[in-house]
Image (tube, helix red, strand yellow):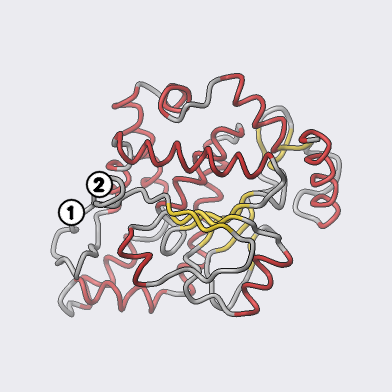
Amino acid sequence: MRSIELPGVSNVRDLGGIPVCGDRVVLPGLFYRGSALADATSADRSVLFGELGIRCVVDLRCGWEREAAPDASAPGVENLHIPFYDKEKVGIEYTEPAEGTKVVGRDVACDPLRFYRSLANPLTANQMRKGLACIFAHAFQGLPVYQHCSGGKDRAGIMSLLVLTVLGASRADILEDYLLTNVSRDKHYQQAFERFLRFSDGDEARAHELTRAHRARPENLEAFYEAVDERYGSMERFVREVLAIDGERREEVRRRCTCPRGQVPAGSLEAEALCSQHLHEVVG
């Protein structure tokens, strides 16, 4: 029920309704994730910026990706570039191709586990802090945010993991949301295969292998969790000291961005209306 089918934008969903601690759920209609908006149709824009009321887009892509395929825009909607990797803006770029592949321009077909582990580096973590601060600042004002990377799986997956972790979701529920990406990804298998075919010099067997390896898998999130534990001690410490969300701030975020689980069915229009009313009450 959280997934939103759009012809020009894939893998779109609302994080609302996901269970969090204290018998509560994430408020519907605040936190959206998905793929880039370069191919958004006029109907897609009407849904995203009209019906859903999204007022801020957080683009996690590299600068060169953003320049090659700019997001669709709309009046009154901010588009913020907060890349995880970007040589010019962040000072670091991911350039390590998977075994048996070549670099195409500035793009690489990465080894997923190595890539997810790499995201725990301090420069990228600083970008995560900026992204979370922006997302929650808008949420506190009742302004929905759409965050995305290219396909809405890896970088958007980790940003969603962080949002949900701060809100108090369990790792099992975070993983369940992450794996929903495969519904969209499997529908676009051929498109992904053709991309990996370029990286593998036309080797179809290797391209199929890469396409399957780049599905959303539990091992990917585990690689990120392990890298955070190794570098920072624990996810809790990472949230508190690196992402700058201490206990008091975390409680405020949870109070403003979640609502009681059992009031109405999560994900329904009634739930969205009720949770929207609750948000306006706590924000004032």
Q: Nearer the viewer, residue 188 or 143?
A: 143
Q: Residue at x 77, y 37 (%)?
A: 259
Q: Residue at x 71, y 39 (%)?
A: 25
Q: Please tell me whether residue 229 is drawn above or below residue 56 in the rendered image.
A: above
Q: Quadrant of the C terminus?
A: top right
Residues packed near mark 2 inside 10 Å, few (<14), some (14 to 19) or many (20 plus): some
Q: Give coordinates of residue 113: x percent, y percent.
A: 29, 47
Q: Residue at x 46, y 70 (%)?
A: 186
Disc 2 + disc 1, Cβ < 8 Å: yes
Name which of mark 2 and mark 1 comes first in the sequence: 1
Give the amino acid type for the residue marked by disc 1 in the picture: Glu
Q: Residue at x 86, y 53 (%)?
A: 270
Q: Which residue is mark 2?
A: 114
Q: Please tell me whether residue 118 is drawn above or below residue 151 in the rendered image.
A: above
Of the numbered discs in the image, which one, if any, rests on residue 178?
none
Q: Nearer the viewer, residue 236 or 148?
A: 148
Q: Secondary structure at mark 2?
A: helix
Q: Secondary structure at mark 1?
A: loop
Kindly give the residue lying farthest to the front in the view shown.
76
Q: Give coordinates of residue 224: x percent, y percent.
A: 36, 39
Residues packed near mark 1 inside 10 Å, few (<14), some (14 to 19) or many (20 plus): some
Q: Please tell me whether residue 167 is drawn above or below residue 75 in the rendered image.
A: above
Q: Which residue is mark 1?
A: 96
Query: Relative to 65, is 11 on the left or the right?
Result: right
For the residues marked 2 and 1, what is the alpha-carbon distance in whole angstroms? 9 Å
Give the amino acid type for the residue marked by disc 2 in the picture: Arg
Q: Give coordinates of residue 276: x percent, y percent.
A: 80, 47
Quarter of the figure with residue 90:
top left
Question: Total number of numbered labels?
Answer: 2
Query: Relative to 209, is 34 on the left or the right?
Result: right
Q: Nearer the viewer, mark 2 or mark 1?
A: 1
Q: Quadrant of the N terminus?
A: bottom right
